[in-house]
Image: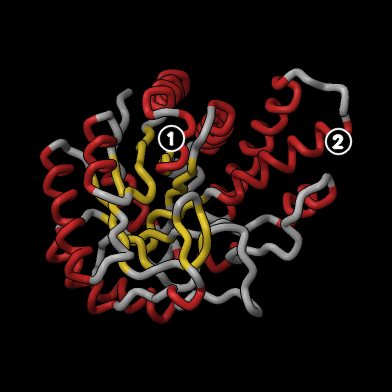
Amino acid sequence: MPLVTSKEMFKKAYEGQYAVGAFNVNNMEIIQGIVDAAKEENAPLILQVSAGARKYAKHVYLMKLVEAAVEDTGLPICLHLDHGEDFEICKSCIDGGFTSVMIDGSKYPFEENIALTKRVVEYAHEKGVVVEAELGKLAGVEDNINVSAKDATYTDPDQAVEFVERTGVDSLAIAIGTSHGAYKFKGKPQLDFERLEKITRLLPGFPLVLHGASTVLPEFVELCNKYGGNVAGAQGVPEDMLLRAGKLGVCKINIDTDLRLAMTASIRKHLSENPGDFDPRKYLAPAREAIKNMVKHKMRNVLNCSGKM
């Protein structure tokens, strides 16, 4: 089975009031853990690659790993570029076999964001590739994305309608209170569901996306800290809020930080308990299993997409 786009996935997700998980990948073990979870859960799946991951692992290696995952599992996988910063990287990924790209023009003024997004959409659609864009700015840090809390801005619902109509984009990442990274909220985490509901009403049937939506599971934070990490006090978006978002038009939820924490916590634990080990297979195998179990938990309890292949 070849790679697929997210178009049919999102149509089913919107109608079924659930979200598809978009999981960031960097190496073989992460990909294996994620696809094994999706296979066992019979869940739709998006694997996404950031510019940083593409630089680290190289485009050709990641493509071959994802192609191997498709061949091994038979899963209909969508391969997505996360946070493409310009036309050139989007074009390179489109030409290089990705089936979905994100052009992130959120740092630009509204009209410049529209012009850039429209250019990517026109090129991508000619090649049968779908496009995600972003309107509004999320706070936090992820790879080369770094936005301070004071510079974060929520998505304007009326602007969202104009943006979608003028660009022809296939999905839209919105800012309603999530944040990149293992960040700390000031007080109790909150999402602006009133804003989300208004955007959904104004764009009926249109798939929305949440970035910065890791829940930062406490067990992995505790393990990281216990074995030499420094992520005390980190917290993410409560799972019940993400589950609710999936019922209100959010069809794609991005997950990266939780993958990093699951893998790092497992490796730290193994090496702390087995200081004499120097065989990477000994500590990467349990890390892969930790990722699989975490992703299965997300699919069942956060995304509500288990059994929705």
Q: Is residue 186 left or right of residue 208?
A: right
Amino acid, disc 1: Lys
Q: Position of residue 28 (x, y in %)?
A: 54, 26
Q: Position of residue 213 (x, y in %)?
A: 52, 59
Identified at 87% across, 22% down, the residue is 276
Q: Quadrant of residue 77?
A: top left
Q: Quadrant of residue 187?
A: bottom right
**How many C-alpha atoms fall within 10 Å of the one at disc 1: few (<14), some, or many (≥20)?**
few
The residue identified by callout 2 is 272
Q: Quadrant of residue 159?
A: bottom left
The C terminus: image quadrant: top left
Q: Position of residue 110 (x, y in %)?
A: 22, 71
Amino acid, disc 2: Ser
Is residue 74 visible in the rendered image? The answer is: no
Q: Is residue 264 left or right of residue 249?
A: right
Identified at 38% across, 74% down, the residue is 196
Identified at 50% across, 70% down, the residue is 148
The residue identified by callout 1 is 55
Identified at 42% across, 28% down, the residue is 58
**How many C-alpha atoms fall within 10 Å of the one at disc 2: few (<14), some, or many (≥20)?**
some
Say if 251 sits above or below 297 in the image.
below
What secondary structure is found at the residue carrying circle 1?
A: helix
